[in-house]
């Protein structure tokens, strides 16, 4: 039986184990933590190389569209699950198919390289270290599957004067709960899912929340027309046909529907791109926070002021006395255990 090393015990790792077993392969999964779930296993600690959601994170995809084909979620689970419920679902999946026995917990892979006989056998050497006992071992496998995701290595932008900023600076990867942000002026840079979730959560406790965006975004709700989950509503034969043969018309229909609930242009969020040209930004509460003034949308950052407390935006406006900056600027795709000659990443691809 051929052996397969799987790096990472998150969702992709679990599926990889199951697929190996279905194909009569013997999997060994390396997981650096003491549990499965990867990104969806909330951890209050910030650990290098480990992805984790915020404590309040809910999924943006309905359960019908993210279900395992051979193991649907319980019927009483919510359409959009909280991260704790999603983790329960993954545990049920792992137990159903007896996947846990193939996982080596608290074992970090530090290096992967071709075996000495690679040209003949195609085998790989996996060097790993036990996080507790610190002992390093090397094992040989017929194949390797990488399932470590891309939400573990923050991408940090640079702006003139940022190094002089005297307040707190962090990346959304480090943000766990709103504790500690009470009565502060917070600037969030970026307009992805994490930025929206943080803005909504901080809006009720911070003194003021600002969100800086280069290009804006189209804001979707989880709940679509007639109360259906929005992804279920959008995925039907008629709309799929329109999108395939007339993407311009499909974009127009989406823009019209989204604009019924929220004037994107009035609140500085209307982008130049069309809805189908970006990953969907789903947030039910951000429009309400903006309309109530708890969240203010700003242009892209131009520079930070020389006194270390303010920021100037590209539209010429300025905000002083900023207490905290949160970079919601995405992540770098990285495989630190692989030599670039094996797998290189350029322009985050």
Image (cartoon, rainbow, N blue to C red):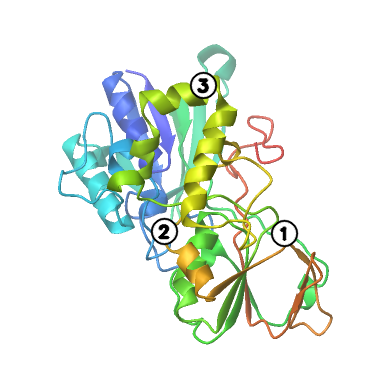
Label 2 Cα crowd, 10 Å radius (few <14 / some 14-19 / many 20+):
some
Q: Give the mark, 3 or 2, whose residue is nearer the N terminus.
A: 3
Q: Is residue 201 visible?
A: yes
Label 1 Cα crowd, 10 Å radius (few <14 / some 14-19 / many 20+):
few
Q: Which residue is mark 1?
A: 157
On screen, residue 107 versus residue 86, left or right, reads right
Vertical side of 208 occupied by 62: above or below? above
Q: Is residue 29 visible?
A: no
Q: Which circle, 2 or 1, is nearer the viewer?
A: 2
Helix or strand or loop: what does disc 2 sit on?
A: loop
- What separation in Å lies between label 3 and label 1 (alpha carbons)? 36 Å
* Percent of width and height locating residue 41: 35, 56
Q: Who is closer to the viewer here, 333 or 165? A: 165
Q: Which residue is mark 2?
A: 284
Which disc is residue 11 wearing?
Answer: none
* Percent of width and height locating residue 72: 21, 36
| Residue sitting at x 42%, y 32% | 5
- The quarter in which the C terminus is drawn is top right
Q: Who is closer to the viewer here, 284 or 177? A: 284
Which disc is residue 244 wearing?
Answer: 3
Q: Who is closer to the viewer here, 21 or 26? A: 21
Vertical side of 244 occupied by 226: above or below? below
Indicate the quadrant where residue 251 lies: top right
Q: Which circle, 3 or 1, is nearer the viewer?
A: 3
Label 3 Cα crowd, 10 Å radius (few <14 / some 14-19 / many 20+):
few
- What separation in Å lies between label 3 and label 2 (alpha carbons)? 28 Å
- The quarter in which the N terminus is drawn is top left
| Residue sitting at x 75%, y 80% | 310
Q: Give the mark, 3 or 1, whose residue is nearer the N terminus.
A: 1
* Percent of width and height locating residue 99: 25, 37
Indicate the quadrant where residue 208 lies: bottom right
* Percent of width and height locating residue 341: 69, 30
């Amino acid at each position: 039986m051929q052996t397969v090393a799987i790096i990472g015990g998150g969702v992709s790792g679990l599926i990889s184990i199951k697929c190996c077993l279905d194909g009569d392969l013997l999997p060994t999964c390396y997981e650096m933590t003491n549990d499965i779930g990867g990104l969806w296993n909330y951890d209050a600690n910030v650990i290098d190389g480990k992805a984790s959601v915020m404590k309040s994170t809910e999924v943006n995809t309905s359960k019908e569209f993210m279900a395992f084909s051979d193991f649907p979620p319980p019927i009483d689970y919510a359409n959009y699950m909280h991260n704790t419920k999603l983790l329960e679902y993954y545990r049920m999946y792992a137990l159903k198919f007896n996947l846990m026995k193939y996982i080596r917990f608290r074992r970090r892979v530090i290096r992967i390289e071709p075996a000495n006989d690679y040209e003949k056998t195609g085998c790989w050497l996996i060097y790993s270290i036990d996080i507790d006992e610190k002992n390093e071992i090397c094992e040989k496998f017929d194949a390797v599957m990488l399932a470590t995701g891309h939400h573990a290595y923050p991408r940090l932008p640079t702006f003139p004067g940022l190094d002089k900023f005297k307040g707190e600076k962090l990346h959304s990867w480090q943000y766990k709960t709103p504790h500690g942000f009470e009565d502060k002026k917070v600037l969030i840079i970026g307009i992805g899912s994490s930025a929206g979730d943080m803005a909504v959560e901080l809006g009720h406790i911070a003194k003021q929340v600002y969100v800086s965006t280069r290009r804006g975004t189209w804001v979707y709700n989880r709940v679509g027309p007639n109360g259906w989950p929005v992804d279920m509503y959008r995925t039907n034969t008629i709309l799929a046909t329109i999108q395939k043969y007339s993407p311009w018309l499909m974009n127009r229909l989406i823009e019209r529907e989204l604009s019924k609930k929220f004037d994107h242009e009035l609140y500085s969020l209307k982008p130049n791109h069309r809805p189908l040209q970006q990953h969907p930004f789903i947030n039910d509460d951000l429009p309400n926070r903006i309309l109530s003034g708890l969240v203010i949308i700003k242009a892209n950052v131009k520079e930070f002021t020389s006194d270390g407390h303010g920021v100037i935006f590209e539209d010429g406006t300025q905000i002083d006395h900023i207490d905290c900056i949160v970079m919601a600027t995405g992540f770098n795709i990285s495989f630190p255990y692989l030599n670039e000659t094996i797998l290189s990443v350029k322009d985050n691809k």
